[in-house]
Image (cartoon, grey):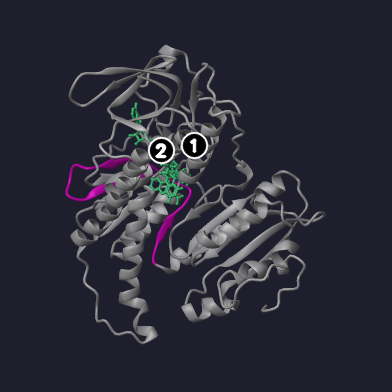
Amino acid sequence: MSYDLIVIGTGPGGYVAAIRAAQLGLKVAVVEKRATHGGTCLNVGCIPSKALLHTSELFEEAGHGFAGMGIRVGQPELDLAAMHAFKDKGVDGNVKGVEFLLKKNKVDAFHGTASIPSAGRVLVTPESGEPQTLETKNILIATGSDVARLRGVEIDEQRVVSSTGALTLPEVPKRLLVIGAGVIGLELGSVWKRLGAEVLVVEYLDRILPGLDGETSNAFQRVLGKQGFSFKLGTKVTGVDTSGPVLKVTVEPSAGGEAEVLEADVVLVAIGRVPYTAGLGLSEVGVEVNARGQVVTDGHYKTNVDGIYAIGDVIAGPMLAHKAEDEGMAVAEILAGRAGHVNYGVIPSVVYTAPELASVGQNEEELKAAGVDYVVGKFPFTANGRAKVNNTTDGFVKVLADAKTDRVLGVHILGADAGTLIAEAAVAMEFGASSEDIARTCHAHPTLSEAVKEAALAVEKRAIHM
Ligand code: FAD
Ligand code: NAI
């Protein structure tokens, strides 16, 4: 059997590429080394973490929020095993969905570890049974990423965990120490905080969520502080002593200085992720990889070797499922002779905490660094009618528009449902909208989305409810 395309890895990048290529008439196979499809995102990433974020938020609401709204339920009791089972059911439904879609689109699925002996050939080594070689015109590397390790800190997934272990802790730790105030640290820190853990986040830099809009992430840090999070910024972890029943975590100022020892029951290492290419045989086949371990591609996702392409977390760019999916669509269209394209200026990013933090486009720091003259329009959720009655008044919408042309350059939202609200901003930016375009668009009342319209009005200082 010879294929037009073999995709290695069935995460959001790989399975979407396979389905789109099959839709366009290519003969496609996928190779996945996990027992289930869906990659990091569906198995140990986006989906299980969002299940726990959802259930833990309801748990917290039932304990603290319901009574104020006139709903007496008594003190809720946590059944953590059932909560994990609920999460696992959600994951199972999703990964089976991908299996179904691959079958429906007549994509052949092989399970095993893939390597590339040469362009045009993929060797599949299953856990048991004989290896086999598949022939193909094109190969797509969509092998994703793995947890970044920290020297001096060994992950055992029991007491010193990565995100994967943090999704399955069998009991709520009394003290959780999170290394890294990035997306994983704040999302999974929120889960365990809501379920009862004391959470301390140790971050190397002097702010949380580096890379996101500074004013918005500062406001977010204050909200998390009110929720009971503790932060130690500008601090690095130099080692974790696991010899006793309590973990001893040695930290010191990032700039150097006196070390101190902190105690924790569980440590979550969340300092980023690194591209995953182990075992593919890239150096043997001559595929270029950069100093960060990313597979190097051109504007059409082609590597330096003809017939070998790459997308998703394993190449440059934000490590996000929707970025990988869009690249999967684009590369499939390119391989089918069409024009595939991803607009990297308009990739939303969302932190799924409560409140959520969502961004698209450039932030103030980036605009300043680029010397762009911009105007800020801001509107707080305290002035939004729906947020008031929902008791979700934390946060604001911030629209950044070009001072001369009024084109929207970035939108940053801290607030309930920010992850859904940001889609409007992404569509507007994709169409090259001005803040005036958003301000003149009729938004339903009473919705949180009116805060987006009001922030757009605020660009010219004419918000109505402020
Ligand atoms: P992956 O999803 O990593 O898939 C790669 C697949 O390739 C894996 O299944 C792997 O087993 C397989 N593979 C690797 N090597 C081989 C080989 N040699 N042979 C065969 N198969 C191989 N992103 C979001 O956008 N939103 C979120 O809410 C979000 N939450 C996250 C939460 C957590 C805890 C984590 C860890 C990540 C989260 N992400 C989120 C990031 C998201 O999971 C990744 O950006 C996304 O999964 C990348 O997709 P991918 O297809 O490039 O790779
Ligand atoms: P991250 O890159 O978001 O954050 C890592 C944090 O750790 C940074 O603040 C960094 O300064 C800090 N750090 C690095 N080294 C450190 C050290 N030695 N000591 C203390 N702090 C240190 O990485 P994270 O949170 O691990 O997530 C990995 C990837 O997964 C991200 O790229 C993210 O895009 C993706 N993801 C996306 C989610 C979403 O879209 N909602 C959810 C979870 C993960």
Q: Determine which quarter of the picture holds residue 34.
A: top left
Some atom of ligand 1 lies within 8 Å of the CB belonging to the residue at label 1: yes
Give the main secondary structure of the magenta stretch: strand
Quadrant containing the C terminus in the rendered view? bottom right
Relative to 9, 379 lies left or right: right
Circle 2: residue type: Tyr
- x 21%, y 57%: residue: 85
Q: Is 11 drawn above or below residue 441 in the view shown?
A: above
Residue 445: image x %, image y %?
Answer: 59, 77
The residue carrying mark 2 is 15
Q: Compare residues 370 and 296 and report the one nearer the observer.
A: 296
Q: Is residue 249 magenta?
A: yes
**Does mark 2's beta carbon lie closer than 8 Å to ligand 1?**
yes
Residue on which disc 1 sits: 328
Q: Position of residue 361 (x, y in %)?
A: 63, 50
Q: Reply above or below: 170 against 250.
A: below
Residue 353, how many percent across, how many down?
43, 60
| Contact (Cβ within 8 Å) of mark 2 with mark 1 | yes
Report if residue 433 lies within the magenta region.
no
> Which residues lie in the magenta part?
228-251
Which quarter of the figure is the N terminus placed in?
Answer: top left
Could you tell me if residue 259 is visible in this image?
no
Q: Is residue 272 above or below residue 57?
A: above
Residue type at mark 1 is Gly
